[in-house]
Amino acid sequence: MTLALHHHGPDDALPLVLLHGFPLDASMWDDVVALLPDLPVVTVDAPGFGASVLAGDPPQPSLETYADAVAAALAGVGITRAVVAGLSMGGYAVLALAERHRGLLAAVGLLDAKATADDAAARDARLAAATAAEGEAGAGVVAGMLTTTLGATTLREQPAVVEDLRARLAAAPPAGIAWAQRAMAHRSERLWVLEDLEVPALVLRGAEDAGAPQEAAEAMAAALSDVEVVVVPRVGHMSALEAPAAVADALRALHARAR
Ligand code: MLT
């Protein structure tokens, strides 16, 4: 499986690689990237999203497959060391990279993410959503994420962000939705991989995020040895869309700490 990479800015320093949340694509980072014109940024489309089309007989869905494909795509353009940050599903992929491709990581960012696995009910709901996405419902299965992911303040005060996410959810590719839901349903608990991860880390969450709760962020921060914790006020689960300036500032600080 070949993943699409999108290069931004110069290419003369340690790259900052950004992995997007479900069910969006690399363009979810556009407003963040625009605020980091001096950094070499590589955004990645997850399997089945953006330009990473699932063709032929795609591999079994898993975060491990996704992480391996990220490492391979980066190696394919000569990137063997990078600051890698992921938002929610992207964060799950960062955790899988920390387990399987640790040497790639000069620093890690875990945004609106959690290191826990799903319980049985959540797993079943994901598998049902995957099947529904492949049927008549299509992208309709993710329409409800508009109100469950954006923070209450954004829903009230940022109509342009609400409309942007509404359009992104309506355009989400059913094959990508299904692949990603099955991959996330089967993901492992990975708090343990953070316990001996010695590179600088960022744990960022929106204060109004119900999907990646404070306890989850605290658990990841407690496991890490060199961590900055950022809580963005008045923001929900889609921090990169809801508060791109705060996210860009935190990523810039993480990049500066990388060794
Ligand atoms: C995301 O934003 O990537 C999703 O909320 C991840 C998930 O469904 O666990």
Image (spheres, grey):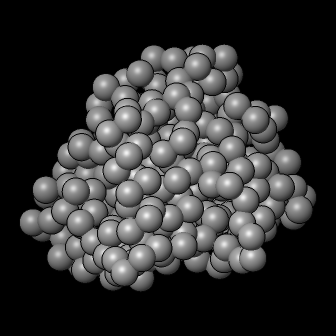
Quadrant location of the N terminus?
bottom right
Residue at x 65% of width, y 39% of height: 96
Q: Quadrant of residue 136?
A: bottom left
Q: Is residue 113 left or right of residue 45?
A: left
Name the foreground residue: 235 vs 34.
Answer: 235
Residue at x 29% of width, y 35% of height: 213
Q: Quadrant of residue 103?
A: top right
Judge whether 257 appears above or below 147 on screen.
above
Residue at x 13% of width, y 58% of height: 153
Observer able to see residue 95 = yes
Q: Is residue 78 left or right of residue 57?
A: right
Observer able to see residue 32 = no
Judge whether 150 appears above or below 113 on screen.
below
Quadrant location of the C terminus?
top right
Residue 31: percent from left, percent from top: 45, 71
Q: How many marks?
A: 0
Residue 229: percent from left, percent from top: 41, 31
Residue at x 18% of width, y 76% of height: 159
Q: Is residue 168 left or right of residue 228?
A: left
Residue 141: percent from left, percent from top: 33, 69
Name the foreground residue: 185 vs 258.
Answer: 185
Q: Is residue 149 left or right of residue 154?
A: right
